[in-house]
Structures are given as structure tokens and as C-alpha cells.
Image (cartoon, rainbow, N blue to C red):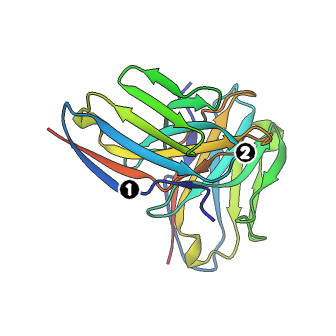
């Protein structure tokens, strides 16, 4: 049972345009959500996070939106740059999870074309 | 501080052999995690340490897997009698006591032939 899903395995965007990556979850106990970026041969790198008490969090070119009623979150990258080309994972954690284990989605490969 | 270090980066082993991976976390981080990532999938939780205590183990961690973190410093993950299905990237991560964004290492890619 996949509790966190990223339904688009890949996304191609022109440089300068907006990239929108989507993530759906099923576990209503999740209350903290994160996005990680992964380049080949490297481990995932933390990008941005959002608590369930918020519906938006912004950090420079990156904004994460959370729709709790739809159990959906999205990552917007504006403007997209070729260096943003990577695999993006969304992840979720539950408040009663004392160990702070993360449940990851399957990833979306973003390709930003110059 | 050079981040989370994992060794080796790559390991090729024959089916049935034992392998051991090492993770050196960021020194002030008392939480250490092991995840496994297979091709086309996201990382899956394996186990978690707070200091030297192993507090959680996933059902993915069969009896052939064992992890240790002596003295709450580095950690080792051992796989006994490797199987082809064990081929994956093994990722280690660490975090301070209260923080959700882990720092991951670059991983150890295991190939069982």
C-alpha cells in the first residue's frame, strides 16, 4: 500500500517557465511534508518542507502548497533553471511517529530544457 | 564537517556472501537512519537509531539484516547470505534531536550477482 504517490514519473519544462510537481497521500496521520531533490550518484538533498498547520511555504524560487482536504501537495519552481533537472521526491511524516521516519513517494524526474 | 559519509560507494558481491556497509553521520546528530532505494522507487525506511539504541525496524529488515551503532557514533549495516533481491542503493541519513529534514549520505550501491 503506497501511502505517498507521485503519479508523474517525469516532467519536461522549458527554462524560465514554471515547474509543478504533484504528490498525493492517503494517511491522514501525516502532518509534515518535505520535498527532496536527488542528482545521480548523490543522496537526496532536503529542499523545502511544510507543516499541516500551513497551506503554503515559500523559499526563493520554491513554493510548496498543501491541500489537506484533498490530501495533495505540490512543489512549484519559478523560474525553472537547467540546474533544477533532477529527481524530486515528496515525503511525509506523522506526529505520533517518535522516530520521525519518512515515507517517500516514487519520485518525479524533472528535465528543464535550455 | 563533511556531512554524512558512506563507505563503500559501490559493492559487487556474489549471491550468498555477507556484506557490511558503514555510515559516519554528522557528528552532532544523535539520530541515524538507514533507507533502501531500488530503481524507480523512493527510499524505503529500514531502521533508526537514537544514539546507540536501535528504536525502530521495518518489516523490510529480514533476519539476514543487522545494524549497529556502537557508542552512538558510526553505524554499520550487515547483510548476511545476500540475495539478488538485495541489490539496491542503501542510504544513511542523520538528524539532530528535533528536526524533520534529514541529511543523507551519497549511499552505497549494492549489486548481488
Q: In the image, is A29 to the left or to the right of A81?
A: right
Q: Is residue A114 visible?
A: yes
Badge 1 crowding class, 10 Å Cα cut-off, few under 14, some 14 to 19, many 20 or more, is: some
Q: Mark 2 lies on which chain?
A: A
Mark 2 neighbour class, 10 Å CA radius: few under 14, some 14 to 19, many 20 or more? few
User: Residue at 55% across / 28% down in the picture?
Assistant: A55
How far is mark 1 from mark 2, CA to CA?
24 Å
Residue A25 image position (x, y, % from top left): 58, 51
- Which is more toward the observer, A34 or B61? A34
The subunit letter for the residue under badge 1 reads A
Residue B108 picture location, percent across and down: 53, 54
Element carrying mark 2: loop
Q: Position of residue B25 (x, y in %)?
A: 64, 36
User: Total number of numbered labels?
Assistant: 2
Where's the N terminus of chain A, which quadrant?
bottom right
Residue B64 higher or lower than A53, as above or below: below
Residue at the extreme front of the image, as rendered: A69
Q: Which residue is drawn at 75% across and 55% down?
A: B67
Q: Are marks 1 and 2 in contact (CB under 8 Å)?
A: no
Res A8 label: 1
Q: Nearer the viewer, residue A106 or B71?
A: A106
Q: Which of marks 1 and 2 is nearer the N terminus?
A: 1
What quarter of the picture does the C terminus of chain A occupy?
top left
Same chain under badges 1 and 2? The reply is yes
Furthest toward the left, the residue is: A114
Q: Which mark is residue A29?
A: 2
Taking depth in this image into account, of B65 and A53 the one nearest to the observer is A53
Which residue is drawn at the image coordinates 44% and 52% (left, top)?
Answer: A107
Give the secondary structure at mark 1. loop
Amino acid at each position: 500500500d503506497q501511502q505517498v504517490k507521485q503519479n508523474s514519473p517525469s516532467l519536461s519544462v522549458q527554462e524560465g517557465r514554471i515547474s509543478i510537481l504533484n504528490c498525493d497521500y492517503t494517511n491522514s496521520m501525516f502532518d509534515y511534508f518535505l520535498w527532496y531533490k536527488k542528482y545521480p550518484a548523490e543522496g537526496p538533498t532536503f529542499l523545502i518542507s511544510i507543516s499541516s498547520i500551513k497551506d503554503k511555504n515559500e523559499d526563493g524560487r520554491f513554493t510548496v502548497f498543501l491541500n489537506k482536504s484533498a490530501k495533495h501537495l505540490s512543489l512549484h519552481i519559478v523560474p525553472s533553471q537547467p540546474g533544477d533537472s533532477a529527481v524530486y521526491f515528496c515525503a511525509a511524516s506523522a506526529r505520533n511517529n517518535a522516530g520521525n521516519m519518512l515515507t517517500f513517494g516514487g519520485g518525479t524526474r524533472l528535465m528543464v530544457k535550455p | 564537517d563533511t556531512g554524512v559519509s558512506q563507505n563503500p560507494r559501490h559493492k559487487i558481491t556474489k549471491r550468498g556472501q555477507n556484506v557490511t556497509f558503514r555510515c559516519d553521520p554528522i557528528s552532532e546528530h544523535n539520530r541515524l537512519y538507514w533507507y533502501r532505494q531500488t530503481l524507480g522507487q523512493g527510499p524505503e525506511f529500514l531502521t533508526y537509531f537514537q544514539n546507540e539504541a536501535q528504536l525502530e525496524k521495518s518489516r523490510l529488515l529480514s533476519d539476514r539484516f543487522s545494524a549497529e551503532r556502537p557508542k552512538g557514533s558510526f553505524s554499520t549495516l550487515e547483510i548476511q547470505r545476500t540475495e539478488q533481491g538485495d541489490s539496491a542503493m542503501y542510504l544513511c541519513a542523520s538528524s539532530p534531536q528535533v528536526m524533520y529534514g534529514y541529511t543523507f549520505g551519497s549511499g552505497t550501491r549494492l549489486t548481488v550477482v
